[in-house]
Image (tube, rainbow, N blue to C red):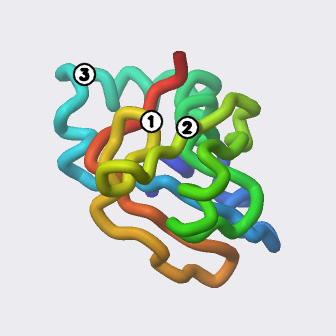
Amino acid sequence: MAAVQAAGLVETLQGDGPFTVFAPNDDAFAKLPPGTVQTLVQNPPQLARILTYHVATGKYTQADLVKLGEVTSVEGAPIPVDGSDGFEVKNATVLAADIEADNGIIHVLDNVILMG
């Protein structure tokens, strides 16, 4: 949540939505190179870009995402989805899918997904 606050995204995510959030777990952030999270928190524009890449406008279940094959992030870049061998979003495996939230749905990831 500190990263979301640092990036100034609290208001966006508290909006009406609906949103689909691809949420890396704590272990996903721990896999990043040392100092990465601290550097990002000190650079709000870059942090906001990475975090908004983890959010799509609309409420997409696992079944919806697999059928679509990709969704567009709030950041504007496409997020590829693969359901052929489990449920993957870009370079991350979905550990928990279809978690209902007040303004959308959450899918928990084992990696931070990066653009490019």
Is residue 24 visible from the viewing direction of this image?
A: no
Which residue extends farthest right? Answer: 16
Whether the residues at callouts 3 and 2 have beta carbons within 8 Å, the answer is no
Quadrant placement of the N terminus: bottom left
Residue tagged 3: 35
Residue, far top? 116
Could you tell me how many numbered marks the image carries?
A: 3
Q: Earlier in the sequence, mark 3 or mark 1?
A: 3
> x%, y% of residue 26?
24, 52
Q: Element at badge 3? A: loop
Q: Residue at x 51, y 66 (%)?
A: 62
Q: Nearer the viewer, residue 15 or 38?
A: 15
Pick whichever of labels 1 and 2 is earlier in the sequence. Answer: 2
Placement of 29 over or under 65, stated as above or below: above
Rendering coords of residue 68 (x, y %) = 66, 52
Q: Amino acid at mark 3?
A: Gly
**Nearer to the camera, 95 or 55:** 95
Residue 80's tag is 2
Query: Which residue is denoted by mark 1 in the rendering?
Result: 90
Q: Are marks 1 and 2 in contact (CB under 8 Å)?
A: yes
